[in-house]
């Protein structure tokens, strides 16, 4: 087979290093991709045909040496199992061990030290065939003469800068973009997933907070309804007393107020003697 021949004599994942011992440049390069991963885990809990890697090496054959990986801040692959055979974890993402499936989406976050996000890596991901390339550059976009958030789509073998945010990706079934959110108890700009209408998918903590707020609102509404019913009851009883003082009979009071006769009689039997 041609495909099989293409991957002959390539090293296995057990032979390839899974870390270059280089720390991430800043906390956001770890925090935000892991937030996206946690959201996917909640949204696609019943799906097993995807994998989201954070700061993980991708070994491929689009470069000069298959033993040299590219390490994006995050990537999403579709059509691959969440776990390797035997329920094993991935040490790295080795394209020739994933039936040749390359990531559908790659995320790079620009840091203080430029990492070739707009040139070398863009060209590499383009050769590799990554469909969507997302560059998040909230701090240094003016320095780099780009926008803070850019999405490139592979069209006819070339990356084309897309417009719109959140940006809808029909092949993924999700949109990606920036928003204000609560991360680790701090309100800040984050990256998140959205639906086709632009509604952000909430995190587990946010869903819990929403459920608590709805429960509190329901309790407040029930208490308000109970208080209103009590006020109406007291008003009806006061009306019974008033009409009785005017000389109306229990039957006339019941008819006038639309109340059962038994209610009127019970109220009058308990009413204090004002004579």
Image (cartoon, rainbow, N blue to C red):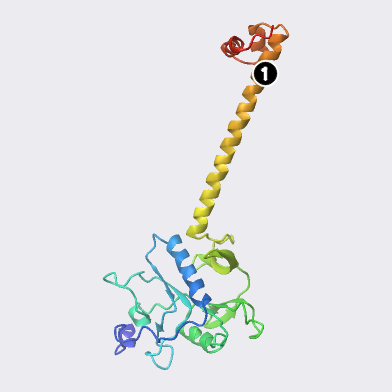
Residue 62: quarter of image:
bottom left
| Residue for point 32% across, 83% down | 13
Residue 136: quarter of image:
bottom right
Against 272, residue 96 (above or below) is below
Q: For mark 1, what is the residue?
A: 238
Q: Horizontally, is 188 left or right of 68 in the view?
A: right
| Farthest left residue in view | 86
| Residue for point 59% across, 80% down | 160
- Label 1: element kind: helix
| Farthest bottom residue in view | 64
In the rendering, at what x and y percent does residue 169 appear?
53, 69
The C terminus sits in image quarter: top right
**Does residue 235 appear in the picture of this structure?**
yes
Residue placed most toward the observer, 171 or 117: 117
In the rendering, at what x and y percent does residue 84 appear?
31, 72
The N terminus sits in image quarter: bottom left
Q: Horizontally, is 261 left or right of 15 in the view?
A: right
In the rendering, at what x and y percent does residue 182 appear?
56, 63
**Does residue 168 appear in the picture of this structure?**
no
Against 226, residue 167 (above or below) is below
| Residue for point 59% across, 12% down | 270
Q: Horizontally, is 193 left or right of 93 in the view?
A: right
In the rendering, at what x and y percent does residue 231 appear?
64, 27
Assess disc 1: are there few (<14), some (14-19) or many (≥20) residues with their C-alpha within 10 Å of its C-alpha: few
Count of picture labels: 1
């Amino acid at each position: 087979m041609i495909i099989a021949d293409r991957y002959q004599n390539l090293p296995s994942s057990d032979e390839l290093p899974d870390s270059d011992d280089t720390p991430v440049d800043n906390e956001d390069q770890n925090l935000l991709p892991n937030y996206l991963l946690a959201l996917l885990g909640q949204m696609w809990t019943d799906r097993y045909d995807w994998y989201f890697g954070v700061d993980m090496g991708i070994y491929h054959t689009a470069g000069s040496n298959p033993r040299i990986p590219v390490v994006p801040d995050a990537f999403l692959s579709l059509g691959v199992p969440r776990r390797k055979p035997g329920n094993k974890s991935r040490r790295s993402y080795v394209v020739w061990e994933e039936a040749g499936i390359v990531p559908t989406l790659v995320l790079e976050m620009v840091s203080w030290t430029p990492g070739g996000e707009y040139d070398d890596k863009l060209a590499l991901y383009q050769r590799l065939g990554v469909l969507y390339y997302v560059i998040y550059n909230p701090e240094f976009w003016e320095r780099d003469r780009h926008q803070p958030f850019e999405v490139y789509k592979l069209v006819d073998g070339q990356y084309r800068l897309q417009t719109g945010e959140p940006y809808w990706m029909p092949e993924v079934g999700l949109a990606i973009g920036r928003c204000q959110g609560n991360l680790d108890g701090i309100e800040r700009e984050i990256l998140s997933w959205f639906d086709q209408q632009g509604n952000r998918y909430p995190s587990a903590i946010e869903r819990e907070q929403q459920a608590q707020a709805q429960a509190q609102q329901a309790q407040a509404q029930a208490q308000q309804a109970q208080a209103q019913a009590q006020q109406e009851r007291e008003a009806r009883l006061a009306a019974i007393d008033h009409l009785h003082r005017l000389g109306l009979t229990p039957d006339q009071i019941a008819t006038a107020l639309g109340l059962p006769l038994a209610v009127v009689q019970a109220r009058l039997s308990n009413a204090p003697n004002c004579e």
